[in-house]
Image: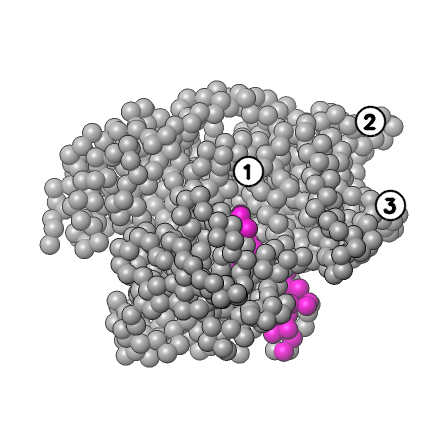
């Protein structure tokens, strides 16, 4: 066994001695290493006795060669794991099923148990069913618990059945904000062999925005639920030594701009540069001018700019934030002492760091902006927003026109038969008011999401905009569905204390819940008259939200254009009521004395915002609210659950024993070739996990709805796909069923449609998949660039597996999705650089055969048989990047690998 004693040093803090794994003992110039590399190196030193860490791994990382991309695989063991309920329920379902599998194979089921601290925060289930009233929060919470009772009972069982597993009940906050304000340690103190050992707080989470914690100087990122489950069970996360991109921040944000404007600028620049799969580290004089809340806003959106993470240093701002949020002075002293001892404190620790590339952003050049209508990186200067929207509308109309008006069987942009020309407006009556619902109408305005509701400055700014609007007599337009869903109970505490909650209430932004809501598609139904008008006129309407995601079909099925904006701009657009209005030049409305009111009349000064934040946000608020974070009140406490180590699977439409381990053997079968596979879907660029994985509302005419009705579930109780992630029968039926998915194999349609081969019959993806499975025909997916962009959804891999998909061939992959595919035993192949389906004129009607891949094999040949009998082949890169990943693939998935290794 290798000895790690040579790496240990002793640090004294407040007359108490602590051991730590000293980076300087690695025998290199540590100053050359970026902070992220230092944290990864410490992780290797601390686990150097384990078989998955080799001496050469430590040496290679310590040398830190930025001149070439590393092909060295290293192991990373996170200190803890964090889950949210959408992704957490299937993770715990899998653990429960793994216990059954262990029992069936003659093993000890209690070996299936988290070995690291695991926290699950219930925050993804609340929906905006009711809004605009003082009872919205109360009523939405009651509806949430009623809808999700079976899921919550299951999670409560898991909390008692598994060790190291805690559940934060609903109504407490958004997982990432709870993590930032309470769960994060920054530096762990752990007793090991009669010694107190210090090491960095690191984590992985089953939500892509786990990266928000990077703003606190804690290294963590999102992984698929599959990979997180393995981490819980003691398996290391394996990866190649990453490239680290440095982003130097200079200057200071100008007055009138927000952290939201800044993060949209960062997202645009980094996405354009290309940081997919890379680590980003922020440094420079500008960092000192950013609060932890500002930093967290930027770190949160790492998935939007494509990076694995976006890390900030630990410094005085960190200590200030930790004190504000109620961390003890002893803990803060330990964090400071340890960070300085390891050369990880402040921007001075980054002065000599060597990055693979460096970018610069001058904060003083940031201007107000929004992003949309479909992607977070599509930033638009606010003064160009209306003209950009108008141009986009014209593009959409041009696309909807068929090239030949005499052609039969044409389809509109919604996938239905081409109807009359869409109208520009439709008369509407709602809540006693008559009005015209126009093209571009803002029908959803939501202050929501982890990105911005963690930041007191932007929330106070939003409330001050509402206050001024109230004073001038402005109202939100009657067609706008408004909502306010902060990420923490502390938010309402400081807004109440400042007397600002009532201002948001008066403007219609009443509290609807503490959760993700609109940002993840839980926007709830639009008022029926609004929905009818949209359908009647085929109107293109918009949503404005302070979120991080605006992908197609995500926010609401009836809303085609979605824009990300700061909370104060959300309020402004709710007043303006239409995206066609240039809110930088045109009036938002008319005051009670008949005068036009402009955005500049409502916008608060930076001094007034900061004065309120300083006066009302204090430590007592955090210690009070987080003192009872695990108390769920009567509703949670009264949930009945069974005290047992093995789950007794009930007859439930929410939680069902998955079929992943059915007929599993103690040893894996050899990897087989894929013979004469059919293409299930042929997809273009930027197909996201939102397109692949079931999300949002369950439509009445979908295979999932058909299944639920057959199981006596009424449409009013369908709930969302996200809430039913614990039932594989629902989820496999909703895979590739997003209303905005365009399958090139079924041209002229949107949604979950394909053409089954060789007949060419059009049907749902689910029905086609079932027929292929019945006929013992394997299937593949062909895709373009950035396949699997977006959330770290394990069902984007689980669903395809259950539909019989054996391989994907894409031009490029997003990091988490590629990993998830391997984690479920699906082979990820990549067209050679510059190539794609277009290179070989693939239309999806062909048959595909792929050779059996072997460990360390870099390329695989794909043989193609066309309908006319002609044959050819092409080479692809095998995107199984590490030996560990091949082991997972060979076993048919990471969970099967873990079970077999524990037998």
Q: Nearer the viewer, residue 773 or 353?
A: 773
> Badge 1 is on which residue?
377
Q: Earlier in the sequence, mark 1 or mark 2?
A: 1
> Badge 3 is on which residue?
435
Residue at x 50% of width, y 42% of height = 304
Q: Magenta stretch containing residue 324, yes or no?
A: no
Label 3 SS: strand
Determine the CA span between mark 3 and mark 1. Answer: 34 Å
Q: In the rendered view, how is the structure colored? A: one colour
Where does the image place residue 564, in percent across and percent down from the top left? 61, 40
State which region is magenta. 684-710
Where does the image place residue 486, in percent across and percent down from the top left? 58, 45
Determine the CA span between mark 1 and mark 2. Answer: 33 Å
> Badge 2 is on which residue?
596
Label 2 SS: strand
Front label number (1 vs 2): 1
Q: Nearer the viewer, residue 785 or 642?
A: 785
Front label number (3 vs 1): 1
Where does the image place residue 690, in percent across and percent down from the top left? 55, 54
Determine the CA span between mark 2 and mark 3. Answer: 20 Å
Q: Quadrant of residue 808?
A: bottom left
């Amino acid at each position: 066994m290798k000895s790690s004693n040579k790496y240990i040093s002793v640090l004294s803090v407040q007359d108490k001695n602590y051991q730590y794994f000293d980076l300087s003992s690695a025998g290199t110039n540590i100053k050359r290493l970026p902070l992220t590399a230092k944290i990864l190196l410490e992780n290797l030193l601390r686990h150097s006795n384990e078989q998955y860490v080799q001496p050469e791994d430590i040496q290679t990382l310590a040398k830190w060669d930025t001149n070439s991309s590393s092909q060295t695989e290293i192991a990373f063991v996170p200190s803890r794991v964090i889950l949210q309920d959408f992704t957490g329920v299937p993770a715990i379902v899998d653990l429960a099923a793994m216990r059954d599998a262990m029992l069936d194979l003659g093993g000890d089921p209690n070996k299936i148990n988290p070995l690291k601290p695991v926290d699950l925060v219930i925050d993804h289930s609340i929906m905006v069913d009711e809004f605009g009233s003082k009872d919205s929060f109360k009523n939405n919470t009651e509806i949430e618990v009623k809808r999700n009772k079976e899921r919550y009972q299951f999670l409560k069982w898991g909390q008692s059945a598994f060790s190291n597993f805690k559940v934060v009940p609903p109504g407490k906050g958004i997982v990432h904000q709870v993590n930032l304000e309470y769960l994060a340690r920054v530096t762990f103190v752990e007793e090991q062999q009669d010694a107190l050992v210090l090491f960095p707080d690191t984590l992985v989470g089953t939500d892509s925005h786990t990266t928000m914690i990077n703003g606190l100087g804690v290294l963590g990122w999102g992984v698929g639920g599959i990979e997180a489950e393995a981490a819980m069970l003691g398996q290391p996360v394996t990866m190649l030594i990453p490239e680290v991109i440095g982003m130097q921040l200079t200057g200071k944000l100008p007055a009138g701009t927000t952290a939201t404007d800044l993060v949209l600028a960062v997202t645009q620049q980094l996405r354009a540069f290309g940081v997919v799969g890379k680590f980003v580290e922020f440094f420079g004089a500008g960092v000192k001018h950013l609060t932890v809340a500002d930093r967290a806003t930027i770190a949160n959106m790492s998935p939007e700019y494509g990076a694995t993470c976006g890390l900030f240093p630990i410094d005085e701002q960190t200590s200030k934030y930790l004190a504000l949020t109620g961390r003890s002075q002893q803990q803060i002293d330990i964090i400071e002492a340890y960070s300085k001892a390891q050369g990880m404190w402040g921007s001075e620790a980054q002065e000599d760091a060597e990055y693979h590339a460096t970018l610069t952003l001058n904060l003083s050049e940031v201007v107000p902006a929004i992003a949309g209508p479909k992607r977070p990186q599509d930033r638009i200067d606010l003064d160009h927003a209306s003209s950009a929207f108008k141009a986009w509308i014209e593009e959409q109309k041009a696309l909807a026109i068929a090239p030949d008006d005499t052609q039969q069987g044409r389809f509109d942009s919604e996938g239905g038969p081409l109807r009359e020309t869409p109208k520009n407006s439709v008369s509407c009556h709602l809540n006693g008011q008559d009005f015209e619902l126009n093209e571009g109408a803002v029908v959803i305005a939501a202050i929501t999401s982890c990105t911005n509701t963690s930041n007191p400055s932007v929330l106070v700014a939003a409330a001050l905009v509402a206050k001024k609007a109230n004073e001038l007599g402005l109202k939100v337009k009657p067609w706008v569905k408004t909502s306010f869903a902060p990420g923490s109970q502390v938010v309402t505490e400081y807004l109440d204390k400042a007397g600002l909650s009532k201002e948001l209430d008066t403007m219609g932004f009443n509290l609807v819940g503490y959760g993700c809501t609109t940002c993840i598609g839980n926007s709830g139904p639009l008022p029926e008259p609004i929905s009818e008008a949209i359908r009647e006129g085929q109107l293109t309407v918009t949503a404005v939200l302070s979120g991080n995601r605006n992908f197609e079909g995500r926010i609401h099925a009836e809303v085609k254009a979605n824009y990300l904006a700061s909370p104060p701009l959300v309020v402004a657009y709710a007043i303006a009521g239409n995206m066609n209005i240039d809110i930088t030049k045109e009036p938002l409305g008319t005051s009670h004395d008949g005068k036009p009111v402009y955005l500049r009349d409502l916008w608060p000064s930076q001094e007034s915002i900061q004065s309120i934040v300083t006066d009302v946000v204090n430590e007592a608020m955090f210690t009070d609210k987080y003192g009872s974070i695990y108390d769920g009140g009567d509703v949670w406490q009264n949930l009945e659950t069974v005290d047992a180590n093995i789950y007794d699977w009930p007859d439930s439409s929410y939680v069902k024993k998955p079929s992943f381990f059915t007929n599993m053997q103690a040893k894996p079968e050899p990897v087989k070739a894929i013979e004469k596979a059919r293409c299930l879907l042929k997809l273009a660029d930027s197909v996201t996990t939102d397109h692949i994985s079931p999300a949002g509302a369950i439509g009445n005419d979908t295979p999932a709805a058909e299944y639920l009705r057959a199981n006596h579930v009424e449409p009013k109780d369908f709930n969302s796909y996200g809430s039913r992630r614990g039932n594989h029968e629902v989820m496999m039926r909703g895979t590739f069923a997003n209303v905005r998915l365009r399958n090139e194999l079924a041209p002229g349609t949107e949604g979950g449609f394909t053409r089954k081969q060789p007949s060419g019959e059009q049907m749902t993806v689910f029905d086609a998949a079932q027929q292929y499975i019945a006929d013992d025909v394997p299937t593949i997916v062909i895709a373009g660039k950035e396949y699997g962009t977006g959330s770290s959804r394990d069902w984007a891999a689980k669903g395809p597996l259950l539909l019989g998909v054996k391989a994907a061939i894409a031009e490029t992959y997003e990091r988490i999705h590629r990993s998830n595919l391997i984690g479920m035993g699906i082979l990820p192949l990549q067209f050679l650089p510059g190539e794609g389906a277009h290179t070989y004129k693939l239309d999806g009607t062909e048959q595909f055969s792929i050779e059996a891949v072997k460990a360390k094999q870099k390329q695989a040949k794909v043989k193609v048989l066309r309908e006319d009998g002609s044959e050819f082949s092409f080479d692809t890169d095998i995107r199984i990047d590490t030996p560990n990943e091949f082991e997972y693939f060979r076993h048919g998935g990471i969970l099967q690998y873990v079970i077999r290794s524990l037998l």
